[in-house]
Image (cartoon, rainbow, N blue to C red):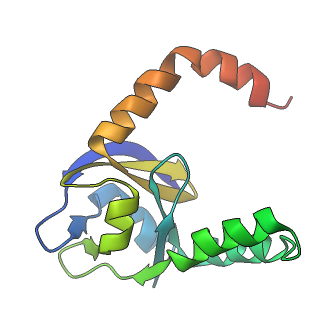
């Protein structure tokens, strides 16, 4: 499982260091491959392979006869890239994904249970400031007893 919030920078070549605690969690899960794709709310989603296969299986069930289903799957899967962690703990973020998430250099990496999110720092700050005041209200609406 992935937890925490980490500030990092992407280098000139588009490489991003995966925080040590997240790399340790990946190692504990015996993750061999990672999948990076367009996320929701303007971020990128990074999945370990096992979780990616679950998500992929779930999204395959979306009917291709429905326009919204086709559109979602096209956008989600066409942006996907298999990425590996190099010996220095970095992944390469493709340009089309950096552009999608408006990432220039500074990022916030967020552990969200079964996935990792990568945000442009300014985008994360805007999301966080816009959401933190309503955190308890949101919890009341989404929590199931």
Q: Residue furthest left?
A: 12
Query: x, y percentage for residue 68?
Result: 77, 62
Residue at x 75%, y 20% (from the top left corner): 140
Judge whether 8 appears above or below 29 on screen: above
Kindly indicate the quadrant of the structure image that contains residue 121.
Answer: top left
Residue 42 lies left or right of residue 134; in this view the side is left
Does the image show residue 86?
yes
Residue 134 lies left or right of residue 97; in this view the side is right
Query: x, y percentage for residue 133?
Result: 52, 14
Pick the front one: 121 or 84: 121
Query: x, y percentage for residue 78?
Result: 55, 78
Kindly indicate the quadrant of the structure image that contains residue 71.
Answer: bottom right
Pick the front one: 72 or 23: 72
The quadrant of the image that shows the C terminus is top right
Residue at x 37%, y 38% (from the top left corner): 124
Pick the front one: 94 or 114: 94
Q: Residue furthest front?
A: 67
Judge whether 32 appears above or below 97 on screen: below
Residue at x 66%, y 78% (from the top left corner): 53
Query: x, y percentage for residue 26?
Result: 44, 69
Does the image show residue 93?
no
Report the number of numbered marks: 0
Judge whether 97 appears above or below 60 on screen: above
């Amino acid at each position: 499982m992935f937890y925490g919030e980490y500030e990092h920078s992407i280098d000139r070549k588009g490489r991003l260091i995966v925080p040590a605690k997240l790399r340790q969690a990946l190692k504990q899960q015996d993750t061999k491959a990672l999948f990076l794709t367009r996320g929701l709310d303007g971020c990128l989603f990074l999945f370990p392979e096992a979780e990616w296969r679950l998500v992929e299986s779930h999204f395959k069930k979306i009917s291709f006869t429905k326009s919204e289903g086709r559109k979602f799957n096209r956008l989600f899967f066409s942006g996907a890239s298999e990425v590996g962690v190099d010996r220095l703990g970095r992944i390469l973020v493709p340009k089309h994904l950096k552009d999608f998430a408006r990432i220039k250099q500074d990022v916030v990496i967020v552990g969200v249970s079964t996935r990792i999110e990568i945000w442009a720092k300014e985008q994360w700050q805007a999301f966080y400031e816009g959401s933190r005041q309503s955190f308890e209200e949101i919890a009341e609406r989404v929590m199931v007893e």
